Image (tube, rainbow, N blue to C red):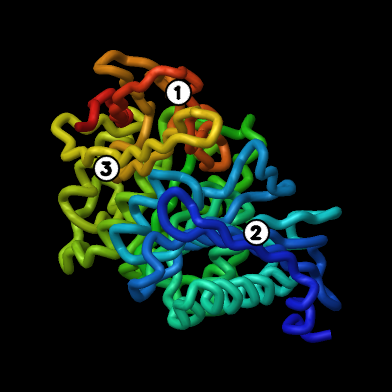
Amino acid sequence: MKRLLCLLLTATSLAAAPDGLLLDLVVPPIEKDRFQHAEFSCWIADASKPIKAVIIHQHGCTNASPDKHPPITSDWHWRALARKHDAALLVPMYQVSGNCSDWNDPESGSEGALFTALDDFSRRSGRAEMKDAPWVLWGHSGGSSWSAQMITRHPKRVLAASFRGGCHKQFGNPEFRAKFGPIARELPLLFVWGKRESVPTSSHFVSWEPMNTMFRELRSIGGKVCRIIDPRSEHGCDDSRLMSIPFFDAVLSGKATTQAVMDMEKSWLPNESFAAHWREFSEHGTLKPIHPNLTAPKLTVTQDSMGHTRLSWCVIPELTGGLRALRFYRDGKLWKELGLKPTDFLATSRDSAPEVLRLQELIDDSPDPHSYKLTFLDTAGNESP
């Protein structure tokens, strides 16, 4: 059976997000596919503008759990990156009954499911170019393994990639490294590993030396690869997006210099600005913007038939500062604050927005009229206009 015929049975939905266009798709397996089913989510900031790239955010092993780790298509921080570069955000989520290889091997059917989703989203969004747009790949653990394999299968389609752990089967295989190196030599790559997975007692230590071997081999042939060790983490994503997002921004902005900056361990760093972030994150495991150029959020206030006031919003965080809290003011006084503690990570272990920051609307059932204002805090506690 051709996958095109499965589209007749595929569940789809289209929703008007508070900000942009949000699309969903469920892709069932076809003959020889090893996954049980695949769910895809896609967000586009402005469907009236051409899409220049697709950011593919691929989760790791174990079945995806949208309740605990929802797709980053609703994440304000990742949306800010996609918005800036006219990119679509695309998140695959696979369910399997067996091993991780039942989806993170592209030949398991996940590659075909991805192309099905790209075709569907390009059609329903009215952006035909999305189907063939270049990719920016982000992978965590098993998602890194999938991304590395997709680079070798579609080398001319990838603009940049960020790996958060993983790839031990690929980078631990001399034959794969010999194939991957020449293909990826000119491709901007970011390797992010947690310091606590660099010790033998970690269950994820298995990927530590393979990653370093791949890093050294890429650098020996002039590969554009940056390695950073997160001092606060083991295998979880935590604050690592504060490296991945600015890295992608530097590459997509065309701000990667010809003579790239080198750190003491000879990483390739796209420019001086990212090099400063690299040094700060390497020491502290996070970034603390001192003088950020924060954009005021947009707050929409409506009233329903019951007289309740409904608040919805759009937030565009600075890429190096992210989003730590939302502050709602009513009649000039702080009314509610939704956010994280200063010591909390900006993301879950699988890089989703923490639960407290997933809310996208509030209801005020006060019968009295009020005036409202909204600000947000970045990771350093800087408050927006």
Q: Residues within 10 Å of mark 3 (few under 14, many from 20)?
A: some
Q: In this view, does 98 lie above or below 204?
A: below
The amino acid sitting under disc 3 is Glu
Cα distance, mark 3 to mark 2? Answer: 36 Å
Q: Which residue is identified by label 1?
A: 344
Q: Is residue 181 left or right of residue 206?
A: left
Residue appearing at x 40%, y 52% in the figure:
79
> First in sequence: mark 3 or mark 1?
3
Q: Which residue is identified by label 2?
A: 169
Q: Is residue 298 left or right of residue 137?
A: left
Residue appearing at x 35%, y 64% in the figure:
188
Q: Do the residues labelled 3 and 1 touch (CB within 8 Å)?
A: no
Residue 297 at x, y = what percent?
Answer: 29, 39
Dot 1: element:
loop
> First in sequence: mark 3 or mark 2?
2
Q: Quadrant of the C terminus?
A: top left
From the viewer's perspective, is the residue at label 2 or at label 1 nearer?
Answer: 1
Q: In which quarter of the image is the N terminus?
A: bottom right
The amino acid sitting under disc 1 is Asp
Q: In this view, does 58 lie above or below 234?
A: below
Q: How crowded is mark 2: few (under 14 residues within 10 Å), some or many (20 or more)?
A: some
The amino acid sitting under disc 2 is Lys
- Can I make out residue 1 in this image? yes
Q: Which residue is identified by label 3?
A: 318
Residue 271 at x, y = what percent?
Answer: 19, 55
Residue 339 at x, y = what percent?
Answer: 43, 24
Along the line of sight, the residue nearer the viewer: 323 or 205: 323
**Res 110 → quadrant:** bottom right
Q: Residues within 10 Å of mark 1 (few under 14, many from 20)?
A: some
Residue appearing at x 40%, y 69% in the figure:
47
